[in-house]
Amino acid sequence: MTEVEEPISGLPQPTDPASDNAAAQVIEQTLLKVSGRPANAEQNAVLNRVIDAWRRRHGQGSPKPILTLVAGYAGSGKTEFSRFLSDVTGWAFIDKDSLTRPLVERLLISLGGDPHDRHTELYLREVRPLEYRCLMETAFDNLNAGTSAILSAPFIAELADPNWVSHLTNRCAARGIDVAVVWVRCDAESMRKHIEFRGDARDAWKLQNWDVYVSTLNTETSPPTAHITVDNRLGTAISLANQTRETLKRILTRLESC
């Protein structure tokens, strides 16, 4: 998969309705391609919020903030897709590993563990819950200030827990915040290639025990709470996202110079 390097936010902004409409149509077509047709009501609601955010980036903003969870297995492409959504919408992008990794590694060492451990009971019981707590509280700091947020993290256990989902939904509803879940689906071979490519020490156990690790994954279905499933098998969604960036760049640059 190709790493994202240049955000749309660094490009010229639309200066007239024609450029804004052209860009919005490109974004909408890409999202429909990666999430499938026909769209259901929940999917349409999320897609409409993304398009609305593009149109409003320099206006008054949407009336309610939205919390978007971009979830998926390691190497599925969720971070790249989160960046794409953030570039298009202007919503805050919060990645779990960027936010918590230095603290996680130091905490594991202080507990007598391996700083790169992401699979033992020590990590799962003592460290992982704190990671997600930090992630969610950072999101709500943004949401409470009226800033929509995109969270990139696996959310495997969380989305499988009806109590966790219900608590989050109720917490958001009490504050007038919308919630959306985007599940990034990917095939095992593509995930392995991505994991090998990034060469991260925290992935060593997965690669060394790949068959055991893969046997714990369900790559055929999405969590029941998912509003949109993005099909990134063989890197399809990320490739389309990058093509969309280039198309938007051409649209905005051409119309800016006219």
Image: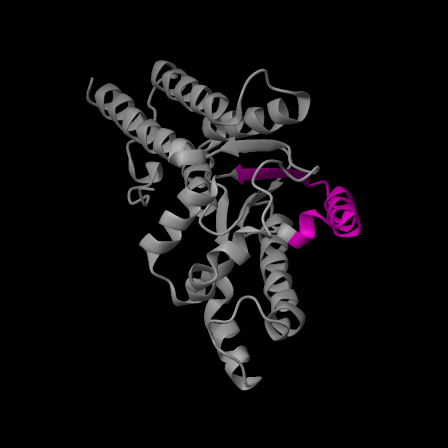
Q: How many marks?
A: 0
Residue 58 percent across, percent down from the top left: 44, 33
User: 9 and 179: which one is in front?
Assistant: 179
Residue 100 percent across, percent down from the top left: 51, 66
Query: Which residue appears farthest toward the left when viewing the image?
Result: 257
Q: Is residue 96 visible?
A: yes
User: 233 and 145: which one is in front?
Assistant: 233
Q: Residue at x 64, y 72 (%)?
A: 121
Q: How is the image coloured?
A: one colour
Along the horizontal axis of the image, is 243 left or right of 79?
left
User: 27 and 59: which one is in front?
Assistant: 27
User: 42 and 156: which one is in front?
Assistant: 156
Q: Is residue 166 magenta?
A: yes
Q: Where, quadrant-wise, is the N terminus in this rendering?
A: top left
Q: Is residue 62 visible?
A: no
Residue 114 percent across, percent down from the top left: 49, 78
Query: Which residue appears farthest toward the front when viewing the image?
Result: 211
Q: Residue at x 48, y 25 (%)?
A: 31
Highlighted magenta segment, given as a residue range: 157-184
Vertical arrangement, residue 208 with respect to residue 249, above or below: below
Along the horizontal axis of the image, is 57 left or right of 257?
right
Along the horizontal axis of the image, is 68 left or right of 21?
right
Vertical arrangement, residue 160 with respect to residue 14, above or below: below
